[in-house]
Every structure is written in structure tokens, then in C-alpha cells.
């Protein structure tokens, strides 16, 4: 298999900036735009031609990734005038594929970080003789997901909407957002109108007797739907829990980009990143967090599981835990921000303005 389609469009809700100006697929995770990891993983699995199917933002992808040759890829970009849904987006780029009708084409969602064994999914597809093969993952709480039960051979038996009652939870297997389609199946998706693969294409194929094969692979899997998940994903890339050939440097407790200026007694742990030209002051403690380009962390700040946007400034002794601070925002000294708080781009919080713990 040499071709893939990467889905990076949609109505925008899931791609909306994480309170940072950069669109989500381009927000750095472990030092490079998140999309780089997916592209590099596909390349490592033998893919050399990838079509990015988007409904907007082509203008940010193309200047950065160009023709893909830096990654050893041939990249093409197709922009929908109106979002066509996941299935419509596939159909819309079909003419760009070089594959013959029976050839497998890899499809992957742009907002999933995974250690999926891509060659194993392709092998499953080949050996089972399926029309479409899907990566399935097991989740602890399936209530937020569409369920994909399979029979004892792994063949998909149904696509079930999000379960509403305990009885409806018939499996913990969910669609993990990576597929192998036979090229000919892509060509049968209706053109020119929105189509959802999960709600229309897959159930329709099952009803027509097509063979859909599930491959349960319990490798690293994270849906980057929330800013907190994004922070987790960046840290897991740095720690090496989420495998990616695109992490710039060795995996470990921290990733300090060359141009970052980190005080000798500042401590970065838990997969934290110090982005280009960032400055981290004396005694600062940063755990499981991403500090993006040009951000400044003043002495004594304590930052955990947080994202600090480009050019933002965090004042001395300020405590952040589970916070997202937008690009260029300023959080003054001696604040305490916790639990999913999002500080908008360019906002300013004066010194000593917010705290959660007692005043002592
Ligand atoms: P549908 O199946 O079309 O209803 O989308 P969904 O809402 O189930 O998809 P989800 O939001 O889970 O997105 C899955 C992936 O597809 C993400 O990477 C999205 O960026 C991408 N995506 C969703 N809708 C579109 C679309 O209309 N066009 C394109 N090009 N990509 C999309």
C-alpha cells in the first residue's frame, strides 16, 4: 500500500484553535505541528502519497508541508467548498488517487494520536479479503462513542449509535479513526453531497453484504478533541509512550528545543516541552506541559498538565494546573489557575488576581 487520505476538515468545531491562534493540526505537539507525527508515521509504514482532504485551512498546511518531500512524501491538498463530511471528503479526493480498484488505501482522521500498527491493519485487510478494514480500540467508558461489535472472526456485525442505556453497551470496541478501504469502495460513495462514513457509508455497506473487518489493537490511542487531551498527547510523544519518528530529539522527561533558554535550576518533567526561543526562569517547575515558542515562564512558577501559547507570559510563582493559556496572554505573578481554565489569546490577568486555595 502506498497511498493514504488524511481527513483534516469538518465543520470546524473539533479543529478550532485551542485558545491559540494556530489551527489545531498545526499546534506543536512535541515540538512539531501535530500533523507531522501522523504524516511521518504513515511514511514509516510505507505510504508515499498522501492527499489531505480539508474543508478549510489549506492555506496553513501547504506553506508548511509543501509537496511533502522533506518528509519523503508526495503530498496533495484538496479543499472542499462546503464540508462534505468524512465520506464525502473521501469521494471528493478519489480522482487524486493512483491506486487500481482492488488496491488498499489508508484513511486516517486528523485528530487522533495513535501507535496503531499500520502494516498489521493492511495485513488484516489482505488476509481477511475485506472491502474495508477498521482499527478498533477498547475504551473504559463506551458511552461517548459509536460502538462496533464484531463476530469471533473479527468481522463487523453492526455500527451502533452512542449507547443511551447500560443494555445498549454490547461491546467496548469503538471506531478508532483509521481504516483501509479498497479503492473501488471509495468510488461508490455518492459525490457532491455530505456523507458520513460512520452513519451512512459503513451501515450501507453492511446492509449490502460487504465485508467490513475490525482489527482490535490496544496500542496507544488518544482522541485530541479537547485541549487537555492535546497537552496529554504532546507529553506522551515526548515520553515515547506515543511512538512517532517525528519527535525532534530523543524521547525522555523533557524536550528542550535548541533555542530555548532554560535556567539551570528550572525543572522540566513528565514529557514537558520548552518551545523555540521560550524562556524558563529560575526555580520554575514544569510537569507534563507544553510551553510554545517565545513564551516566558518567570521564576518560581509551577506548571502542570498545561499548554502555554506562543508568546504568552506566566508570572513569578504563579501556579497552573490543567490550564490552557492562549497565545500572547499574560498571567501576572502569584495567580493560581486550575482545572480546565482557558485564558484567551492576548488576555491579561493582573498579579495576584485569581486563586483557588485559601488565602493563607
Ligand atoms: P461525519 O462522519 O462526516 O459526520 O464526521 P464526524 O463528525 O463523525 O467526524 P469527526 O468529527 O469524528 O472527524 C473525524 C475526522 O474527519 C477529523 O479528522 C475531521 O477533521 C475530519 N472531518 C470531519 N468532517 C469533515 C469534512 O466535512 N471534510 C473533511 N475534509 N474532513 C472532515
Image: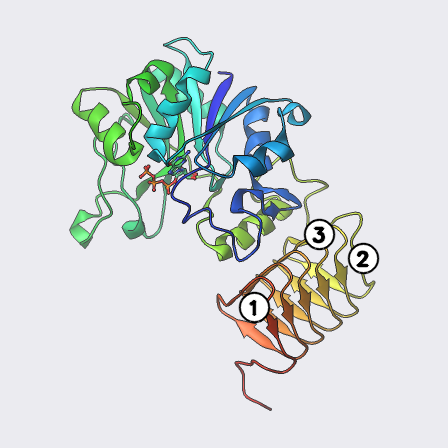
Residue 47 makes an appearance in the image: no
Disc 3 from disc 1: Cα separation? 19 Å
- Residue 4 position in % (x across, y down): 48, 23
Q: Nearer the viewer, mark 3 or mark 1?
A: 3
Residue 25 lies, in percent from the top left, at: 53, 42
- Left or right: where 324 falls relative to 132: right
Question: How far, Cα to Cα, is label 2 from label 1?
Answer: 22 Å
Query: Which secondary structure, mark 2?
Result: strand
Q: Which residue is mark 2?
A: 261
Position of 96 relative to 196 (above/below): above
Quadrant in which residue 35 is drawn: top right
Q: Mark 3 sits on what residue?
A: 275
Residue under pointer 1: 321
Q: Position of residue 331 (x, y in %)?
A: 63, 72
> Does the rendering let one see residue 267?
yes
Mark before the other along the chain sequence, 2 or 1: 2
Q: Are marks 3 and 1 in contact (CB under 8 Å)?
A: no
Using the numbered discs, state the Cα–Cα distance from disc 3 to disc 2 in whole angstroms.
Answer: 9 Å
Question: Which residue extends farthest front?
Answer: 81
Ligand 1 lies in which image quarter? top left
Residue at 29% x, 31% y is 195
Q: Are marks 2 and 1 in contact (CB under 8 Å)?
A: no
- Tell me: 161 left or right of 326: left
- Dot 1: element: strand
Q: Secondary structure at mark 3?
A: loop
Quarter of the figure that contains the C terminus:
bottom right
Above or below, 165 relative to 50: below
How many dots with numbers? 3
Q: Position of residue 248 (x, y in %)?
A: 70, 40
Amino acid at each position: 500500500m502506498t497511498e493514504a487520505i488524511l481527513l483534516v476538515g469538518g465543520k470546524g468545531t473539533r479543529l478550532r484553535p485551542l485558545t491559540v491562534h494556530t489551527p489545531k493540526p498545526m499546534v506543536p505537539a512535541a515540538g512539531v505541528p501535530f500533523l507531522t507525527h501522523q504524516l511521518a508515521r504513515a511514511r514509516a509504514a510505507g505510504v508515499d502519497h498522501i492527499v489531505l482532504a480539508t474543508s478549510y485551512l489549506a492555506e496553513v498546511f501547504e506553506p508548511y508541508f509543501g509537496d511533502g518531500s522533506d518528509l519523503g512524501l508526495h503530498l496533495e491538498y484538496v479543499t472542499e467548498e462546503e464540508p462534505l463530511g468524512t465520506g464525502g471528503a473521501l469521494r471528493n479526493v478519489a480522482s487524486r488517487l493512483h491506486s487500481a480498484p482492488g488496491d488498499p488505501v489508508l484513511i486516517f482522521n486528523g485528530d487522533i494520536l495513535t501507535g496503531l500498527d499500520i502494516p498489521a491493519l493492511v495485513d488484516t485487510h489482505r488476509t481477511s479479503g475485506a472491502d474495508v478494514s477498521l482499527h478498533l480500540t477498547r475504551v473504559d467508558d463506551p458511552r461517548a462513542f459509536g460502538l462496533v461489535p464484531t463476530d469471533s472472526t473479527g468481522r463487523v456485525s453492526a455500527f451502533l449509535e452512542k449507547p443511551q442505556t447500560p443494555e445498549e453497551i454490547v461491546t467496548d470496541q469503538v471506531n478508532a479513526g483509521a481504516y483501509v478501504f479498497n479503492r473501488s469502495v471509495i468510488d461508490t460513495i455518492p459525490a457532491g453531497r455530505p456523507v458520513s462514513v460512520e452513519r451512512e457509508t459503513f451501515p450501507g455497506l453492511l446492509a449490502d453484504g460487504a465485508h467490513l473487518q475490525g482489527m482490535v489493537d490496544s496500542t496507544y490511542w488518544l482522541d485530541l478533541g479537547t485541549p487537555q487531551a492535546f497537552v496529554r498527547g504532546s507529553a506522551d510523544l515526548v515520553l515515547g509512550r506515543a511512538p512517532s519518528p517525528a519527535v525532534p530529539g530523543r524521547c525522555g522527561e523533557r524536550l528542550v528545543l535548541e533555542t530555548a533558554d532554560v535556567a539551570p535550576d528550572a525543572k522540566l518533567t513528565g514529557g514537558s516541552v520548552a518551545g523555540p526561543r521560550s524562556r524558563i526562569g529560575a526555580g520554575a517547575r514544569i510537569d507534563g506541559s507544553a510551553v510554545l515558542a517565545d513564551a516566558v515562564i518567570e521564576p518560581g512558577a509551577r506548571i502542570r498538565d498545561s499548554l502555554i501559547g506562543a508568546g504568552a507570559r506566566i508570572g513569578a510563582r504563579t501556579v497552573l494546573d490543567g490550564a490552557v493559556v492562549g497565545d500572547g496572554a499574560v498571567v501576572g505573578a502569584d495567580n493560581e489557575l486550575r482545572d480546565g481554565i482557558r485564558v484567551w489569546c492576548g488576555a491579561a490577568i493582573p498579579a495576584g488576581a485569581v486563586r483557588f486555595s485559601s488565602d493563607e
